[in-house]
Image (tube, rainbow, N blue to C red):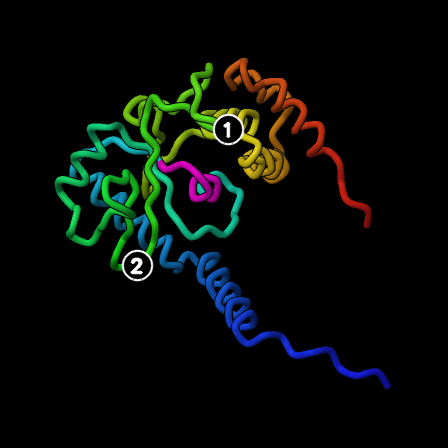
Amino acid sequence: MGSLPDMLDPAAEARLVAGIRNAERFFMKQAPVQQALLKITALLEAAAIPYALIGAMALNEHGYERVTTDVDLLLTTEGLAEFKRLHSGRGYVDKFPGSRGFRDTEHGVQIDIVIAGEFPGDGKPKPVAFPDPAAVAERGARLRVLPLPRLLELKLASGMTAPHRLRDLADVLEVVRRRHLPLDFAEQLAPFVRDKYRELWAAAQGRDPE
């Protein structure tokens, strides 16, 4: 008989178990990141600060559930300054001195901030920019989220212009699959990203062999 394989490194095993438990809490809507999201959006609503949920948590709101550990929010420069005036040092601390992002000290969750008017991906000027949340955010049952066309065109522009952001293109492909988006959904997107959407739509029609 062959010998049994070496045992898994205890530290690696602990990380694996912790990841599984976090995923279980996430899909049960009980993970720290979800608690942090509801907390900060309640504070933003109370202060009448315009915002929109973006990033992986926004994908979850739009029907593509995948685990994430941080919250991404779209704010204006003025909105970020007002939130920090009200809450810096009161449950939130800067990630580093002068950073726009911060950490929820209660839940241990990173809050990443994107500013309206900036550009996705490589950060260089392009026909797609982060919009004003006051003008575009959709009000859901619990919070405000970027509409799906605006979210996907930002992800497409990001993946098209930043080689290290290919995950954004993969996210679009998965949303096409999960939501069964049609080819003509491209007409709801900025012309700059339509051809890339059509390319990913075609790729999404493929299926792995049984």
Q: Is residue 116 above or below residue 165?
A: above
Q: Residue at x 37, y 53 (%)?
A: 34
Name the main secondary structure of what is drawn in magenta: helix
Residue 165 magenta: no
Binning the other alpha carbons within 10 Å of mark 1 as few (below 14), some (14 to 19) or many (20 upward) gives: many
Q: Is residue 207 above or below residue 182?
A: below
Mark 1 — residue? 158
Which residue is more in the foreground, 7 or 61?
7
Q: Position of residue 83 (x, y in %)?
A: 19, 39
Mark 2 — residue? 107
Foreground: disc 1 or disc 2: 1
Label 1 and label 2: CA atoms lie apart by 29 Å
The range drawn in magenta is: 53-60
Q: Quadrant of the N terminus?
A: bottom right
Q: Is residue 185 above or below residue 65?
A: above
Of the residues under marks 1 and 2, which one precedes in the sequence?
2
Q: Residue at x 50, y 60 (%)?
A: 23
Outermost residue toward the front in this view: 97
Q: Is residue 144 left or right of residue 44?
A: right
Q: Position of residue 18 (x, y in %)?
A: 48, 67
- Residue type at mark 1: give it: Ser
- Residue type at mark 2: give it: His
Q: Position of residue 185 (x, y in %)?
A: 58, 22
Binning the other alpha carbons within 10 Å of mark 2 as few (below 14), some (14 to 19) or many (20 upward) gives: some
